[in-house]
Image: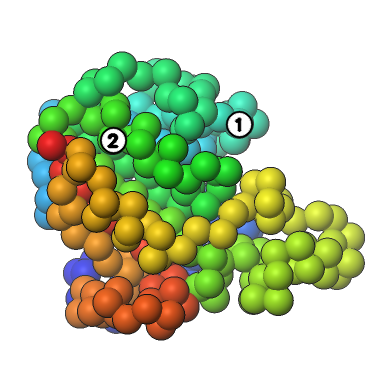
Amino acid sequence: MASTSIGRSVRLFRAARREPVDPAGFYSLLAADSVHQLSRFTTLAGSLVLDVGGGPGYFRSAFQQAGAHYVWVEPDISELSAGGIVEPGRVLGSALDMPFATASVDICYSSNVLEHVPDPWRMCEEMVRVTRPGGVIFLSFTNWLSPWGGHETAPWHYLGGHRAARRYERRTGTPPKNRYGSSLFAVSVADALAWAHGHHGIDVVAAMPRYLPAWTRPILRVPGVREVVTWNLAMVFRRR
């Protein structure tokens, strides 16, 4: 799917909205798109890829088909086994203290995880730590002020995360999977860009609204607007 294609954006948005009921469909589409995006910045064939917060391993097949050696770390044992994938490469561990040696992987990848950890910048530091000099880090997340920032409680998160969670529980009879303040946190585009540009161990190769066409990148230079329009921010770094 060409990064300039409106059709690509439509397919990704539709799949994202269906993620709660069809996670395999969404993540398989996102995995193929991720491989395409990463291939513009580095060589996947023969590279060791670490997927941070990889869940049951939905991205495994796409990376392996591109010739990469794929491993993934996931802190939740139920998520780790949800897809029934029992191949080698699964590691139980926290993104905030990963059980991997410093400078041990060629590519460190994370998709839609940063907003689910209580200390996002520590996770980012860990991704930098485990990546070898010259290696590539790909990081994307759903920013809080985007229309999908509250995940299944959106768009009511604009009135407050706790209020949105209470409304969801009243309406459905069950609490949301992503609970604001415990498994969902407010991460902004501005803070992520500031962290990246202020880090002395990486070079920022690219920053882009992940689901939007490439020509929308100038949005990231507009404070306020970028928080709503970006929806999902993707950043690519090279380890110094």
The answer to whether residue 164 is left or right of residue 158 is: right
Q: Position of residue 166 (x, y in %)?
A: 83, 64
Name the secondary structure under disc 2: helix
Name the secondary structure under disc 1: loop
Question: In front here: 214 or 57?
Answer: 214
- Residue at the spot of label 1: 76
Q: Tell me where residue 75 sits by quadrant.
A: top right
Q: Earlier in the sequence, mark 2 or mark 1?
A: 1
The structure residue drawn at horizontal position 32% and vertical position 60%, both measured from the top left corner, is: 193
Q: Position of residue 134 (x, y in %)?
A: 10, 35
Q: Tell me where residue 125 sits by quadrant.
A: top left
Question: In front here: 176 or 102?
Answer: 102
Measure how far apart labels 2 and 1 are at the Cα level.
Answer: 22 Å
From the viewer's perspective, is residue 44 above or below residue 144? above
Question: In front here: 117 or 63?
Answer: 117
Q: Decide: marks 2, 1 in contact (CB < 8 A)?
A: no
Q: Quadrant of the C terminus?
A: top left
Q: Position of residue 17 (x, y in %)?
A: 55, 68
Is residue 61 at all visible to an observer of this figure? no
Res 128 label: 2
Q: Position of residue 47 (x, y in %)?
A: 17, 30
From the viewer's perspective, is residue 226 above or below residue 238? below
- The amino acid type of the residue labelled 1 equals Asp
